Image (cartoon, grey):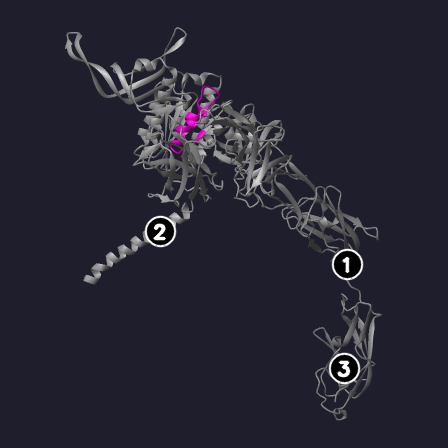
Amino acid sequence: MRIQGKIPLLLLFILFLAFIFNSTNTYSKGTSDLRVDFNVTPSQEVIVKPVNGNAKASLDFHINPIGEVKETNRPPIDIVFVFDKSGSMNSTRDKMQNAKDGLTNAVQFFEKNKQSNDRFSLITFSSDIETILPLSNDLDAIKTSMLHTTAYGGTNYTDPLRAAKNMLKDSKNEKYIVFLTDGQPMIATSIEKVKKEVCTKPFLFFCSETSVVESDQQLVYDFQNRYSYNRWLHKIYSPDNSKLKSLYIPSFTMDGTSFNAGWYNPGELETNSQRMQALIKQKGLEVSKEIYNDKITMHTLGYGEGDLDDRYLEMLAQQTSGSFIKASEGSVSDAFEKLANKLNSVKLDGEIVVQLPENVTVDQNQYTVMNNKVYLPFSTVYEVGQGVPTPITVSLPVEFSNKGSYMFKDLKVQFKTAEETEWRSSDRKSVTIEVKDDAPASVTGRVDLNKINQDLFNLIIEDGKETNTFTGLFKLDFGGLVNPKANGDLSEITIHQPLPEGITVKESPNVTIQNINGQQIAIIKVKQKMSFENGAFTKPALEIPVTMNAVWAINNVKMPQAKVYYVDSRYGNKVSSNLSPNNNEISAKVRTRQMQNGREFAFDGYSNGTIKKVRIQGQTETVVATLEPGVDSRYPIMPVKSLESEPTQLTITYKNGATAVLPFVPELIVKDPLTETILDDGSSVSNEVEFYLSNGIPGGNISYHYQLLNEETNGEWTEIELEDTKIIDRFGKNEIRVKAVGGFAIEDYIIESTIWIEGDELIRVPSLIELYVGETQSFNIDIFPFGKPNNNYNVRVLQGDDGMINSSYSQVNSIKENRMTGLSPGEDLVEVETKNGKYKKMIRVIVKSRIVNLESMDFTKSKYTLLLEGNAFDIHSHLVFNPENATNKNIKNVLDTGNDVVDIVQENGVWKVIPKNTGVTTITVTSEEDPDIKAIAIFEVVAGEDETENPETGDGDIDGRW
């Protein structure tokens, strides 16, 4: 019993191991190869400590994703779309409608790609929240709500973002917020520490005594409360109308406006627009930190050309490891689709963990700090078929309160996918920054990427247009001078901007491209020297614009961090500094256009090899067909470099120079099945013809149709499958017409091929028919197509050389049986001709008489010897008739010489000779046919003793016996 009791436990253990093994296998097949590596550099290795301030630098982390995703295997997702419907959305005629169409486009994307456990919601807002739809797998409610959304009111970021956070915080799915706005925040709400005046002794309707108390209170920051005397009046208030005496503000800096931690008078803040704007933006950053703490990723979409703060929207997204996209009115649908693709992909979340040395601080209002460790969030998205994601640069600004050498030790990156519960960690690294009394001047700054004609996420590479160009504006700030007597200059200023694959720069005398350690780098030389006198630069900032462009299709590429090199004349050595990284994502597609039947279409090629056909109607673009790469070996998963449209096909050139052809029309193959020869248009054959369609058209929902025109068909369009062989079996002219519908097919484009089936061999008849007078014979007339019922011919009997018609032709229509009947002896010609009169064959017909006249008759031998006692001799069996098939072979009479040697008798119509006496006689046989036809032979009768040997026979003749 004990042994039996252990068996279930053993089985459970085995099942447990199987489960673990299975889980490991599932994981290994999914995203186990997705990981990141990193390196870290200081913005400057040596920095200067100002006398009355902190030294400032940054740690720049370069995150390199590893691995790629071949097929979508994402977890369930929850998405809340937060949609700005403030009054500025009506600033142009179509602005609001374009935004609504863009969101609807994203909803339609998820209708096609959603999973059963996915959920979606919509929040619309202006000064307040207007609409909150519950999370649901049904997307119809969002589309319906968009139909009835109108624009009015101000712009409040905090309330809708906090509502979205509260909706998602307890979800077990991957959680996302997609936030669209066209303006800066003008209203914010938050719970603040305040001092307010309260009534301690109420008296009737009055208060006789008040006091100030400290509490947590909800506040509203309203940047444009009302307009009076040509200026906006700002307001900070509590919804319960409490009388605020002061509020506590932690230290932070926003857009150059700084607050030191402490109590502030609301009335004084209300008079300062810059401070009010900074406070409102800071409240938005606080909400974005709350969003990240609830493990929610937020992507921000800045819309239009209005009053947007791109860097602020980028900060909001980055604090949640999300991304920022800037979209114009014409590209907002593309922006939504791009975000939808990200959300439908596999995400790798990560954190950079930095242990701060003593005397080193960061802005805790912007960064998460616990136990003196900073946690910098990031995420990388693996889109299906897009290869390895672009590297990421994350900068952490740090400040140093004292001079010295600071080593940041045990720097690490930890990361995980959605299916993992524990962080995986990279190798640990260290970096050192020296803080000194004096050092070479500092050059800091950043590069701003600005669109020229096209949004950065939607660049278009198209011949004759500059829609693939953008500007890199390098903004250099010169400082770091602590000695008030410092004089000199910075020379040999050179910017090194690494170029991601697919991006190049417009070269000039001051801008060149070099390959350094396998990396293409734009070398940007600054001609002028930057002078400084008495501890200050003559010109403290410099902007260098560089024109850049995409050269092939790319996806979500980020510009690598740039370095600036320079020489401080006081030191003579070349030093370097990192510029702040730009986190704009750059995407480009390749485009060519074509007119088809008076309508304009574009063909777009993408970084993963996808090809789309787009219908262009004014400013509206509609995708009508998509070629997914990798499904067909002809179309690899590879960035598209160029597209060339021809009347019936698109030639695709890929990044590596390989090419592929995408047909717009099917290929019609017409073949002679006997010789396997491919037939050209207008070819002529004398047998059946096959045709089929090969090399189908990509794009999905394709149907193919054919039409066959000849003397017997009505020309109706009939659907046909690829490689489905059809037979043409009608002689004469056959016109094949083929068209395709759907996908990349050119609508109403018809391919035609004409084949002639002709020649004498199209008629099969016997060459000779022989029959007797009165006899009827059946024979075959087989007109092409052979072997099938076909009455497409005429028959005529022509007289032969004797000038007479000796036979007749008839046909039984019910079975189409051809017959010839003999009328009289003779020879005719029968003409079989196709009804169109083009082809004919002749049959020779011989009619014979059934009576065959006997021409001669003879015995088989001239002399016969009979035994006197032998058997009777059968005369008929010893006669030869000429012709052998003579009709009448009857014997009229048989006579001998009358010498009594034999008796001649007729028994039952058979003439016989019976030996009677020895001797010799002559017998004459006369034909019944003609008395002149006779056979004569000598007969000798001998006695038995004259025999030599074995005289016994059966026919009386003993000649030649032994």
Residue farthest to the front?
485
Of residue 734 and residue 400, the one placed in the foreground of this image is 400
**Amino acid found under the numbered disc labelled 1:** Lys
- The crowding category of the residue bearing disc 2, from other C-alpha atoms within 10 Å (few below 14, some 14 to 19, many at least 20), is few
Q: Which range is magenta?
A: 300-324
Of residue 704 and residue 133, the one placed in the foreground of this image is 133
Residue holding disc 2: 22
Q: Which mark is residue 903?
A: 3
Report, in whole angstroms, how far the alpha carbon at label 3 lies from the one at label 1. 42 Å
* Left or right position of 381 against 23: right
- The crowding category of the residue bearing disc 1, from other C-alpha atoms within 10 Å (few below 14, some 14 to 19, many at least 20), is many
**Amino acid found under the numbered disc labelled 3:** Asp
Residue holding disc 1: 848
Residue farthest to the bottom?
945
* Quadrant containing the N terminus in the rendered view: bottom left
Rendering quarter of residue 882: bottom right
